[in-house]
Image (tube, grey):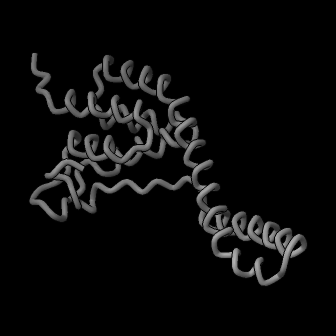
Amino acid sequence: LPAPLRAEPALTFTLTVRAPTQLLLSASLGTTLASTFVSLTSSPILALLTFPALLTLIIAALLFVAHGRYVTALERDLTPAIGRLSALLRSGNSLRPSLLKLHTEMPPGPIQAEWAFIVDRIGTPLINQDGIATPAQVVEALSVQTPSRRHATFLNHLAVAVGLSHDL
């Protein structure tokens, strides 16, 4: 995060790519199958010794695949969401009401979760600073935490635009 937002717990986005119980169940099943194969093809002692390494590798592989799916889903939904957001902003709505409307219209997914983070955190009291989180701060904080580079680029532009005065 940028220096003023670094270590600001109120602006930390928690990415959930897979349910922990589902991850552990899948990893345990995969490790058990791999250990059984090792014990059948070599010695049971080798299977016991390789179990922790196999478990670690399988968890890493499952997280890597889940992360890839998350980014793919986020980038797939990004262009239509930006189009809808720009239409709502052009119609005279401000950022927060536009994002709230989009949140109710969007199907559950990564883009909905990340934009809900923006809506939820605007106005949140900051812990390590005085004051409350401004829209520009929240958008900027999310831009450095999202795993999608395309989304991060959009959020960087949005953070600048939100911070500008729009008086006519």
Residue farthest toward the bottom in the current orientation of the protein: 45
Quarter holding residue 70: top right
The total number of labels drawn is 0
Q: Depth check: 60 or 81 in front?
A: 60
Quarter holding residue 26: bottom right
Residue 79 locus on image (x, y percent): 47, 23
Q: Depth check: 166 or 93 in front?
A: 166
In the rendered view, would you say 95 is above or below 121? above
Left or right: residue 144 versus residue 38 is left
Going 19% across and 45% down the picture, which residue do you hit?
A: 134
Going 55% across and 53% down the picture, which residue do you hit?
A: 17
In the rendered view, would you say 108 is above or below 129? above
Q: Depth check: 63 or 73 in front?
A: 63
Going 64% across and 70% down the picture, which residue do you hit?
A: 53
Q: Depth check: 85 or 47 in front?
A: 47
Residue 48 locus on image (x, y percent): 74, 81
Left or right: residue 65 versus residue 32 is left
Quarter holding residue 125: bottom left
Residue 29 locus on image (x, y percent): 77, 68
Residue farthest toward the front in the current orientation of the protein: 42
Residue 51 locus on image (x, y percent): 70, 75
Instruction: Say which quadrant the C terminus sits in.
Output: top left
Going 40% across and 44% down the picture, which residue do you hit?
A: 146
In the rendered view, would you say 128 is above or below 74? below
